[in-house]
Amino acid sequence: MSNSTLSPSATAPDTVHSAPYAELRKLVKEAATLESIGSLLSWDQETYMPKSAGDFRAEQASLISAMAHQKATDPRVGELLEACESDANLMGAAHSAEAANIREIRRDYELARKLPTDLVSELARATSLAQDAWKTARAKSDFATFRPHLEHVLSLTRRKAECYGVPKFNGRTGELYDALLDEYEPGMSAAEITEIFTPLGKRLSGLVADLVNGSQKVSLEPVKAKLPEAQQQTFGLEVLRAMGFDLNAGRLDVTTHPFCSGMAPGDTRLTTRYTSESFLEPLYGTMHEGGHGLYEQGLPKGTRFGEPLGRSVSLGIHESQSRMWENLVGRSRAFWEWALPVAKKHFGPAVGGLTLDSVYAAANYVERSFIRVEADEATYNLHIMLRFELERGLISGALPVADLPGEWNRRFKASFGLDVPDDAHGCLQDVHWSFGLIGYFPTYTLGNLYAAQFWEAINRDIPALDAQIRSGDFSSLLGWLRNHIHQHGRRYSASELCKRATGAALSPEPLMRNLEGKLRPLYGA
Ligand code: ZN
């Protein structure tokens, strides 16, 4: 990617000189620096921390969160914001760097001030303990040991939502859940999500039924092979490098539940896991987190760390980046034309017999299954819809925690036609609720929708994309993402960003077109 492809405004420095604005940026950066220390502690907890360090780690996490929160809610921030907001030079143009930064700092400040510091530190402590409890509970499929932790985290999360207050949307009052959703996908409501999810769920269920009853069978057998972790790691790293992920400014480690942490300038950490019967699942885990990592590396953190313009706009947009690399690139035939020889180089005779047709088909294997993170593209969003309904009930109180396993299993049966064998394959499979991440799940499906819509725009803008991918050249793709998404940080809202990048508001049609167009021919359906 060359710099000439960047639109000029986005990474340019601020042009207005203002002492209050300079001090405001400094304070925001200090708060983010404390937050980044918390992220490093959390990354360590998920990767290398000894088991017995858990209790003290919870104290560390609690203290650092409280310090970051105090810094972010310092009344001086409020004074500086007022000074900046009354300065016409700063606020002149709505999307200027200064005006966008000040608008978003105000939003963060108002939200943070609604939370008492004792609640923030208690949430950090409770979720740190709940994560360890979840790991043990999941390993033993023992919901009872996790239940009190989840109840405690939920009561604190509900308190948090009450502090934020129920938002209004065009005069209509939302629900408590919306206050949580707003943290991850600003401006989105549960009602709006339901409007998107309900028809989309029906279309996806119909597609899945057609595929599994199709005239052609797709097999996973050709890609089944127990391959050494070290080889999988070097293969994953080669793919990451080709994608454009800078390993001098990032790492790839192993964890139970893969994630990406863009914790600091020059420091973006990816994790993956090598537990599968085939190399595909770990590869897609790595590409997924790599997509998140490229977004983090593409944010202008060098000059704007901690400022809204140096941060991602929403989780939906973040997830669009990971899902695009995982699914739209990684499960394409063009990708495998390049990647199959690379895989053979790393894995040798163990995958010697693999053909382009068989690996492409296996990469697009569709099956109703229990585990979300292993789910294919066609069933994936159905897993999300289930979680959205359940967590909405957990927050409203309609669903008591004690009833969660039963309700999960009942709904899973209705939607997937399968009997959940144990809670590890059911309500204990995801880490999110132990982190207090409620209102987070729907952003995964929004991410899939954004990704497919971006992908259509990218293919219009780069007609040679398919040929480039076949030769392992991802540079113009990354250039497009840098230009249209990454560099803007929070300058535009997610919906504005989508309109600017694609010329249209978010729609489920590109996702359905992509899935139908790819999967029906493969399955003879
Ligand atoms: Zn993700």
Image (cartoon, rainbow, N blue to C red):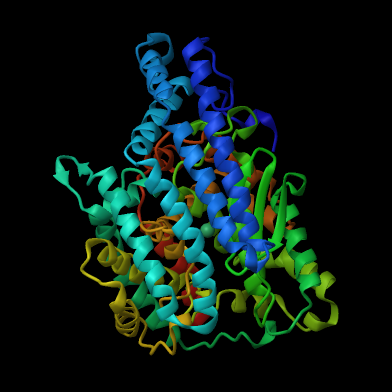
Spot occupied by residue 17 in the image (x, y as percentages of width and height)? 53, 9
Quadrant that contains the C terminus:
bottom left
Q: Residue at x 55, y 23 (%)?
A: 26
| Quadrant in which residue 412 is drawn | bottom left
Q: Residue at x 43, y 82 (%)?
A: 423
Above or below: residue 293 compared with residue 32: below
Query: Can residue 448 be seen?
Result: no
Query: Can residue 126 be seen?
Result: yes
Q: Nearer the viewer, residue 250 or 97?
A: 250
Spot occupied by residue 4 in the image (x, y as percentages of width and height)? 66, 28
Q: Nearer the viewer, residue 313 or 140?
A: 140
Q: Nearer the viewer, residue 377 or 53?
A: 53
Spot occupied by residue 263 in the image (x, y as percentages of width and height)? 61, 45
Q: Does residue 98 appear left or right of residue 496 in this picture?
A: right
Q: Residue at x 47, y 48 (%)?
A: 317
Quadrant that contains the N terminus:
top right
Spot occupied by residue 319 in the image (x, y as percentages of width and height)? 49, 54
Q: Nearer the viewer, residue 67 or 163?
A: 67
Q: Residue at x 85, y 77 (%)?
A: 348
Above or below: residue 130 compared with residue 138: above
Above or below: residue 455 compared with residue 433: above
Q: Does residue 201 appear left or right of residue 520 in this picture?
A: left
The mark tally for this picture is 0
Q: Does residue 212 appear left or right of residue 29 in this picture?
A: left
Q: Does residue 67 appear left or right of residue 470 in this picture?
A: left
Above or below: residue 115 compared with residue 155: above
| Quadrant in which residue 466 is drawn | bottom right
